[in-house]
Image (spheres, rainbow, N blue to C red):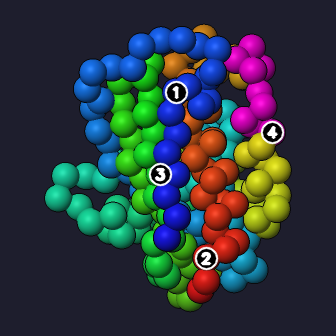
């Protein structure tokens, strides 16, 4: 299993703000969810034009595997079979005072649901979600990392914390997608 630490200074070397004395820890989970063609699920909130791996916060008392299954149902609309945990990250977000600890799992869409579609259009997620080959996911995430704050869509450009958190999330997801090719099934 591989582990990576991301710090404010790594991602924003010219932004000299002091690190907080104490970080608020948030436990999260992400998934490299593969369909029958080995394409990766990438989710997007409606109209944002930005893509991320499915996943989210782990609820109190919840096992990471259960959290990923719940998130896959909420964001992708299908049941999954978890293969294994293969990577983890820690993100020290100085500007927000948060420490994200994320575990990432390889998973497959359950055989009974191989023809599953993304969840309905009335959800926060749905019609903008995509299945892409690993190389395309890497390209997509690399492009998002290179965006500057003034290139973010008007729907979220007015909130600087959106750009800040998005850069951490995209960098983390790129790490997971890149490392997933080395994980043995």
Reading the image, the residue beneath label 1 is: 8
* Observer-nearest of 87 and 63: 87
Between the C-alphas of marks 4 and 1, the distance is: 20 Å
Residue assigned mark 2: 183
Measure the alpha-carbon separation of dots 3 and 2.
16 Å
Circle on res. 89: 3
Answer few, some or many: residues within 10 Å of disc 2's Cα (few below 14, many 20 plus, some between 14 and 19). some
Q: Marks 4 and 2, Cα distance to the nearest angstrom?
A: 24 Å
Measure the C-alpha gap from mark 3 to mark 1: 14 Å
The residue carrying pointer 1 sits among few (fewer than 14), some (14 to 19) or many (20 or more) residues within 10 Å by Cα, namely: many
Where does the magenta region start and end? 143-151
**Chain-order first, disc 3 or disc 2:** 3
For marks 2 and 1 on the same chain, the one whose residue lies earlier in the sequence: 1
Q: Identify the secondary structure beneath mark 1.
A: helix
Instruction: Examine the rendering and report whether any part of residue 30 can be seen.
Output: no
Q: Secondary structure at mark 2?
A: loop
The residue at 23%/61% (across/down) is 62
Disc 4: which residue: 143
């Amino acid at each position: 299993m591989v582990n990576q630490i991301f710090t404010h200074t790594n991602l924003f070397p010219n932004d000299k703000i002091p690190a907080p004395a104490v970080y608020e820890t948030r436990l999260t989970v992400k998934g490299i969810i593969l369909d029958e063609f080995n394409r990766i699920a990438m989710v997007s909130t409606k109209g944002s034009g930005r893509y991320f791996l499915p996943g989210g916060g782990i609820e109190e008392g919840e096992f990471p595997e259960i959290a990923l299954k719940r998130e896959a149902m909420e964001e992708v609309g299908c049941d999954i079979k978890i293969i294994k945990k293969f990577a983890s990250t820690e993100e020290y977000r100085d500007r927000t005072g948060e420490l994200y600890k994320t575990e990432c799992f390889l998973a497959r869409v359950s055989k009974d649901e191989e023809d599953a579609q993304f969840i309905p259009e009335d959800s926060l997620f749905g019609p903008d979600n995509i299945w892409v080959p690993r190389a395309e996911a890497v390209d997509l995430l690399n492009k998002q990392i290179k965006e500057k704050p003034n290139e973010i869509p008007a729907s979220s450009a007015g909130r600087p914390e959106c750009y800040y958190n998005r850069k951490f999330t995209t960098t983390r997801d790129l790490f997971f997608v890149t490392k997933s090719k080395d994980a043995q099934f």
